[in-house]
Image (tube, rainbow, N blue to C red):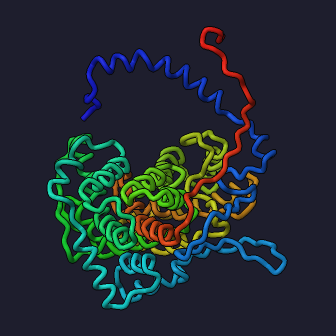
Amino acid sequence: MTNTTYTAAYQEFLSDVMPKIEKLAQLARESTEIDNSWYYKFDVKRGLRDLEGNGVLAGLTDISDIVAFSIDENGNKTPSDGVLRYRGIDIHAIVDGFEKEKRFGFEETAYLLLFGNLPTVKQLNAFKEILSGFRTLPESFVRDVIMKAPSKDLMNSIARSVLTLYSYDENSDDISIPNVLRQSLQLIAQFPLLSTYSYHAHNHYHGAESLIIHHPKPSLSTAETILHSLRPDSKYTDLEAKTLDLMLVLHAEHGGGNNSTFTTHVVSSSGSDTYSTVAAAMGSLKGPRHGGANIKVVQMFDDIKKNVLDRTDKNICDYLERLLEKQAFDGSGLIYGMGHAVYSLSDPRAEILKSYIRELSEAKGLDGEYKLYMQVARLAPEVINEKRRIYKGVSANVDFYSGFVNATLGIPNDLFTPIFAIARIVGWSAHRIEELSNNGKIIRPNYKCISEKKEYVPLDKRR
């Protein structure tokens, strides 16, 4: 399916006007470029971070905590292994808890993040029943919305579906906590369907594939629902479902300062509706600097396998150096999956995922792939520390391993970021409720204008 929705006359106009737009774009760039010295002059925290990478304190949260440094009695900071806590509970303890009992953990984690405490057996079962009941879409929604004009990017398709669900909600603008919680639980339950159905629609119209839509089964967990809905035969192993469930748990929340969650706070603070808020967060997560990073990791490894046939440590290091020098892969100068805005010595999510991928790779017959990932994880920090000035430690982050897990599970690249969204909507929901519960002011940071005063010039006197 190609872009034939516009008329031939419009397409002709577009081809004629683009050269003019390109010239105007140069004017726009020139009029908005600001010399770096101004940022230092006014001590502007670009990206809301200082020169050492510390985030500007913009709010308080009781939902999760990220620790990357130890601080002594004199206030001196020392990089430490990363710690992530959901509602005060270490992520390692949460994972160990449901893994030892051989249970799925995402629903339990969602309950913890939304309500502040681990659920009892009765509470967890009731919570699962609510999600199961919400795991449906309005009548004809798949045909009338998801199947119509599917986007080449699934995140846009899902965001459109979220915005359209506003029209099906009789209390769409009610931002009372009970109603927002109802909307949040409904979206948490619906996101696996919106994601997989959007993928199948995209594959059908853009890839000429057979269209297969599986109805959800009430008894399945969120991870099982994804695999059931995604795969034509609906088959999956327990190891596959449990590994995907672990991925969802690790991606469910990551503090109030990550880009998409901060977007959730910003839009919620304006009093906007839940659907607009979630769609805005989706737009943020789509970016390759945020949720789209794990796709870049897989693509980078494809490039390594293509260009480094004899994978000695030296040859891998040479390739990694070329990456940093913008001479390999996409020319960005980045080794994707390495380093994090907050963590220094280690990302706890990456450490947990790393411990599980060996079993998955062995089961899938991908030992060679696993060894290559481990080799790059070992060598990349050494190369980065040698070639770049690093104010803190650098290590593999969660995106480094999550891309590998997604690919090993047979999840298409197009679904990598939607899988992230299926998990993170839990965190977005908890933070939206937190923002609305605390009667905060509208979030509006200050931008200093540095333009000079100018006089208005009449049209006929402009040159």
Whole-percent x, y for residue 280 in the image? 44, 52
Locate residue 172 relative to residue 47 in the image: left or right.
left
Residue situated furthest left in the rendering? 140
Whole-percent x, y for residue 179 in the image? 34, 69
How many marks the image carries: the answer is 0
Locate residue 154 relative to residue 209 in the image: left or right.
right
Whole-percent x, y for residue 150 in the image? 27, 43
Residue 405 lies in what quarter of the image? bottom left
Which residue is depicted at the point 43% across and 73% down? Answer: 249
Q: Is residue 388 above or below residue 268?
A: above
Q: Is residue 368 above or below residue 201?
A: below
Locate residue 399 relative to residue 106 in the image: left or right.
right
Whole-percent x, y for residue 203 in the image? 25, 46
Residue 367 lies in what quarter of the image? bottom left
Q: Is residue 148 above or below residue 107?
A: above
Answer whether residue 52 is visible to the viewer in this image.
yes
Which quarter shows the N terminus? Answer: top left
Which quarter shows the C terminus? Answer: top right
Q: Nearer the viewer, residue 217 or 333?
A: 217
Locate residue 167 relative to residue 51 in the image: left or right.
left
Q: Is residue 428 above or below residue 156?
A: below
Which residue is depicted at the point 41% across and 84% down? Answer: 99
Which residue is depicted at the point 50% across and 53% down? Answer: 293
Answer whether residue 251 is visible to the viewer in this image.
no
Q: Nearer the viewer, residue 432 or 415?
A: 432
Residue 407 lies in what quarter of the image? bottom left
Q: Nearer the viewer, residue 157 or 462?
A: 462
Which residue is depicted at the point 70% across and 36% down? Answer: 34
Residue situated furthest right in the rendering? 74
